[in-house]
Image (spheres, grey):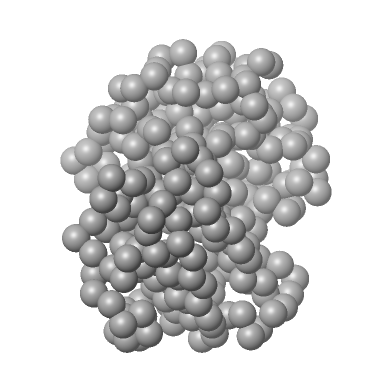
Amino acid sequence: MKDFPSCFGESGVQVVDSSSNAAKSAHNLVTCIYQAQVGYNSYAITLCWSKHLMGQGLNIEIEDSANKCLCKFDVKPWLFSKWKGSKRLEADSAKIEIFWDLSAARFGSGPEPLEGFYVAFLFDREVVLLLGDMNKEAMRKANAGPSPCSAVFVAKKEHIFGKKVHCTRARFCDNGKVHDVAIECETVGPRDPSLEIRIDKKRVLQVKRLCWKFRGNQTILVDGVSIEVFWDVHSWLFGGHVGNAVFMFQSCSSSEKSLPWSSSRELKETQLRSLGFSLVLYAWKSDY
């Protein structure tokens, strides 16, 4: 775990291509990963919310424990008839049903809906994952009862933009409290570069002499829970403002495990799922 910073070295992980086009397209993507245990079978449910010139979109993918894709489809912003619908399939001797209604969803500045929607996942007629604030409508449409084995929110990946301060709202565990997160990094000027992370306006981490500590990790306390924070701001300091910094917040109960990073160019969903809950933020400078 302590060798995590080396994973972002030349032979380690480069999360996103450093071109400006990649940055602009990545800005409007949020990926949420859920783990569902149904009987003896385990499933990964991935939702990727996106924002386009034509409007918001959603990609849904379901994988089994062997990483075999069982279902993958898009709710595209320009196909208005698809903003409300359902999909059914059978896999691993289980009947899987998906119901969604985004026709009245209200959005903020990001790609995720704030209210006025639901997305429901059923396995063998039981709801294992229900997102949104229209629970009654979803249950009526699905004509099913909740499952005692609800899916667990295990990972979120988000791209954030900013000049000096990068802000977002996030929770650090399944069903946890939503917090305001601010990452401030001063990389120009007469002062030595420094890094500061604040949660609900309270400073929880400060890194001085950042040119020597551009990769590292430190434990913080949030809601009485220990969270390990990893950072890599190499591209901010030495990349000429081209590229993104990477921050990961991970519960310490899972961070005690050996981090299974590969030499691939992106963080795989299968790797994130094996870590317990992980929040990964890709921070881009908006003035490069």
Left or right: 99 in relation to 80? left
Quadrant placement of the N terminus:
top left
Quadrant placement of the C terminus:
top right
**What residue is drawn where x is 49% and y is 80%?**
101
**What residue is drawn where x is 22% and y is 45%?**
223
Q: Is residue 201 above or below residue 88?
A: above
Left or right: 152 in relation to 189? left
**What residue is drawn where x is 66% and y is 53%?**
27
Residue reaching furthest to the front: 93
Q: State the image coordinates of residue 263 (x, y, percent, origin top left).
A: 63, 21
Q: Is residue 88 above or below residue 33?
A: below
Q: Quadrant of residue 224?
A: top left
Q: Is residue 186 above or below residue 217?
A: below
Q: State the image coordinates of residue 252 (x, y, percent, origin top left).
A: 29, 30
Q: Quadrant of residue 139?
A: bottom left
Can you see residue 45? yes
Can you see residue 191? no
**What residue is drawn where x is 71% and y is 23%?**
238
Q: State the image coordinates of residue 287 (x, y, percent, origin top left).
A: 74, 46
